[in-house]
Image (cartoon, helix red, strand yellow):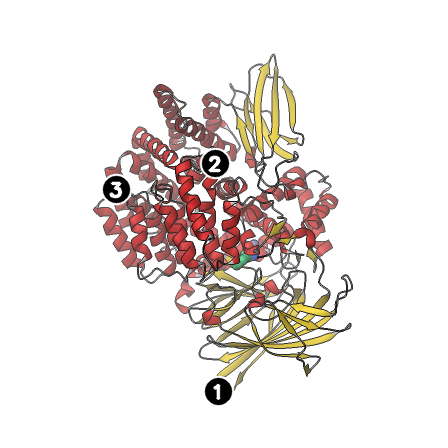
Amino acid sequence: PPLIRRADYKPFPWLVPETRLHFDLGIENTRVVSTLKVVPNPDAAADDVIRLNGDGLQVSSVKLDGLPVKNWEMDGPDLVLPLSAGAHEIEIVNDVSPEKNSQLMGLYASNGMLCTQCEAEGFRRITFFPDRPDILSTYLVKMEGPVAQFPVLLSNGNKVSAGESAGGRHWAEWHDPWPKPSYLFALVAGDLVARTDSFTTMSGREVDLAVWVRAEDLPRTEHAMDSLKKSMKWDEEAFGREYDLDVFNIVAVSDFNMGAMENKGLNVFNTKYVLADPDTATDGDYDAIEGVIGHEYFHNWSGNRVTCRDWFQLSLKEGFTVLRDQLFSQDMQGEAVKRIEDVRVLRAVQFPEDSGPLAHPIRPDSFREISNFYTATVYNKGAEVLRMMRTMAGPVAFRQGTDLYFERHDGEAATCEDFVKAMEDGAGLDLRQFRLWYSQAGTPKVEVSLTHKGDTATLALKQTVPPTPDRIAKKPMPIPLRLALFDRDSGSHDGEQLVILSEAEKTIAFEGFARSPVLSINRGFSAPVSIEREVSTEDLVFLAAHDDDPFARYEAMQDLVVAHLVAVCSDSLTGAAQEAGRKAIAGALRKVLTDDRLDDSMRGELMMLPGQTYLAEQFLVADPGRIHAEREALKVALGVALESELIALHERASTLPATLDHASRGARKVKAQALVYLAAGNPDVAAKMAAAQYDAAQTMTDRQGALMVLTGLPGVARTDRLIDFYNRYRGNELVVDKWFALQASSLHPDAIEHVKALANHPDFNLRNPNRVRSLYMAFAGNPHAFHAASGEGYRMIADLILALDPINPQTAARFVPPLGRWRRIEPQRAALMRAELERIAATDGLSRDTYEQVTRSLG
Ligand code: HT7
Ligand code: ZN
């Protein structure tokens, strides 16, 4: 497959101002008639042919300006048609088979309904078209089909007409007045029902809202609708963005490659991000639904009204929209906890990407398959880069920058450079050096040291951007670091400062400190960097107890544990030092458990141990078996040392009602965390408590939290509750997904055998991405099972990739990165991982998706 380069961008020689589509709908066969108005692009070099992208399409007929023509030819999957200068109308007829479409890109069938997924290059699997985001067109879409099978017919924009036709058939016509790229096209046809509502925009227009689902799911749509209304209001208030059509439809689909899709006026969602009630959805599920509904809605401006010129600019819409959804969720749920959660995800997923073979800048320079670049780097690091601009400008000036961006580029296909320019002009920032964040991959390392002499504390900072496969030598980048210096005696500081480290090295003197202060740095995680510093356990304990920045307090707890576990795993601690380290951590954790000024939601965050992948990131070459064992051993020690406090916390938290308010949700979070430690320290007591919690549970959060602990413990309580859970929720796809995931991620020593058995369970289905992810993504994140020294875990993931690739290459390719980390793993396991990648690479007929990921991983 060819490498596509950002530097090769050329505008398309033709524009397509209008697109008319007619669909004769059927599950086995759908006939598509597409009529395109085309005119020469005044901003491009003229061409005497037009290349229309296709993917696996067969042409039935082509007309040019109303007359049948035969002078077109196929060039690979594309149709190439000679065209004289001037305006033309092209009509193409072709057929597609939705039921045979297992890739879930283009038009496909899911549970008897028809739906589409066109981003990034799915529209070319429906009809021939210049399938690139800089070709904006208005769409008039007519759909026709049997009423009984497809009573609901939806597309983008506003419904303009509908009617009955002979033979029990009907039709509907939708018009989207906003010119859009083909990746935002959508169509849905099926037997669906809607929860409806309305929203009055800031200028007083009424918008009809609908969430479309299968009839049995209707009772679980209230939260999605609430989230949509909150998103619409928030975007008006926070970014001045108003909705622009008469209707906004959301449709929930069971078979979906990603979370959701922002098609203009017709968002299509994975059911996972729509359906919720307390019995079947956890508190985390509720938050994720609110976040994803917000994300897709916010794309209406950051993505749809202003779209991307080419796919290298993906972070322009995704990084920006992730930032917007994060700010929205911070406002809905509380800033501190949301920030901690977002950083945890960044470190668990994006940091390893940035330090591995798949590292790329937030604006990549080349790709073979764009689907492989919907990554944590483009999304989450992209959001962090924008957040840094916001930190440097302040929220008011940042808003002036985004206002200018929307005003300048409304209706255009823009670039990351356009955004940066608007930010410079609107927010008054000088971003010349800052642009390096768009072109340099790798997580910068900032070495920090604080010395003290007389009444002066001197801070020395040194940055390095590590080499990545695309580039060895890197330049220093501007790194905004929020910091504070605490007085040890009073436990307070004289105000936070923002230091921008733009040079490779810098020292700053702070006067007026008779005693050496305690440094709190990168507060709020103001820059996506890794901080390296020699810091005493005493200072970390101080910050864990006193820091007034909640993120920094969390960070101090994490650093305390990371420093300890890294030292233990490196065999650099004596027995006594190890004991002292555990004692210090237990002391800090005890304060967290018993501090009655803390709210439970924050307490739950502070209780979480750093994850296995983040710990592994601290080593150049990691031993996952050792890290897992030492992390578990620490849990045992903490569970033993703090048993009475943990039981008391669990008891206190169990008295709160099973409601969705902040306090009750926080209580459920600490209950689950308490059980995790108790299961390590005193498995018998924990098993009894977890079984009781499971039996009494009135929410999925409590039930799942208890079952998670039980699943890791051998014994009859485990088996009984797993059977109960399955029988209780059998038939509910999303809850059965949880049942698969819980077992695949379990600490149980036989987890591998359990996963093998589950792969043969009648409910397992390779064609449903949610089910595949629930079993195998959970397994790939299970440190002891995936990294089994025998290599069996690696083999299972490689077997999965090979089995899934012909069915759904996009989903298959997403399982490559866990194997791709081999270079950072100890030699014996690394060899086993590499061997599995080589086995995949040697297989004939690999998809472009999997081929690209495997070859990059072998590098
Ligand atoms: N913009 C959407 C991306 C997406 C997608 C990409 C590739 C293949 C399938 C897909 N489904 C959705 C989702 C988003 O970021 O909002
Ligand atoms: Zn998005």
Q: Secondary structure at mark 1?
A: loop
Front residue of 703 and 170: 170
Left or right: 732, with 256 as reference point: left
Q: Under 8 Å from ligand 1: the CB of mark 3? A: no
N-term mark: 2 or 1? 1
- Of the numbered discs in the image, which one, if any, rests on residue 167? 1
631 relative to 379 in the view: left or right = left
CA gap between label 3 and label 1 equals: 62 Å
The residue tagged with tag 2: helix, strand or loop?
helix
Furthest residue to the top?
454
Dots 3, 1 in contact, CB < 8 A: no
Please report whichever mark, 2 or 3, sits nearer to the chain's N-terminal start.
2
Q: Quadrant of the N terminus?
A: bottom right
Q: Along the line of sight, which residue is nearer the eye, 699 or 812?
A: 812
Q: The disc labelled 1 sits on which kind of residue?
A: Gly
Residue under the point 47% across and 56% down = 811
